[in-house]
Amino acid sequence: ISGTSNYEIISIKLGSTSLVIPNDQNIVSSKAGVYDYLPVKSITLPNTYESVKEGEFSNVIGLTTIEVDAGNTNFKASDGALFSYSSIEGVVKELLCYPNSKTATSYSISSNVVLISNSAFKNVKYLTSVTIGTNVMAIGENCFENSSISTITFKSTTVPYLTSSNVFNTDIEGFTIYVPSAAIFTSSLIVIS
């Protein structure tokens, strides 16, 4: 593949546990489901990648890290997680995906992040605690679906908007949400029983 056309990945033949999408192929996106059930530990997106679909990496088997080429102006990776990036402002904006097999048990979302995408923590196996930064304004549908997360702590007194009643979508016994005491009376939080 070469030239000025843009391409989408429609299938993958894997020969190792690392998938590096090359920079010189003008690959801008992937077909929905193309990564589902691939046994891959790491994925590296090229500088040309422009679009990530909801839950694009949620069903990868064994994914521990997502990396992004330094020249990509749409996405950045930090601590193995994938974020949308505003090259104009020079900051990450939205947490798109936390790797489902990363072995860390706790994770704090930075104060730069304003959105947590649909299915961002879907199928996460080892993470048990997430702290949500002070500037997160909204959390997407099925964000924590089928995950091992049992504790979520909000740092802001303004609890983020929950895009649906399925945001937490968990059946973990003892699932707990912590909110600053000032937030309890100033915000409306959907209570999931």
Image (cartoon, rainbow, N blue to C red):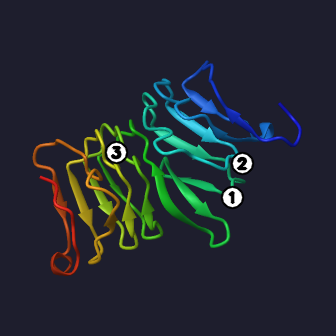
Q: Earlier in the sequence, mark 1 or mark 2?
A: 2
What residue is rendered at 28% in x and 38% in y?
146
What residue is rendered at 23% in x and 76% in y?
187
Amino acid identity at mark 3: Ala
Compared across the picture, whether 140 is left or right of 172 comes to: right
What residue is rendered at 36% in x and 73% in y?
134
Query: SS for tag 1?
Result: loop
Q: Earlier in the sequence, mark 3 or mark 1?
A: 1
Quarter-wise, where is residue 132 in the image? bottom left
Compared across the picture, whether 119 is left or right of 190 comes to: right
151 vs 17: above or below: below
Query: SS for tag 3?
Result: loop
Query: SS for tag 2?
Result: loop
Can you identify the residue that label 2 sits on? 47
Dot 1 alpha-carbon crowd within 10 angstroms: few under 14, some 14 to 19, many 20 or more: some
Can you identify the residue that label 3 sits on? 104
101 vs 121: above or below: above
Can you identify the residue that label 1 sits on? 73
Q: Residue furthest right?
A: 3
What residue is rendered at 49% in x and 41% in y?
65
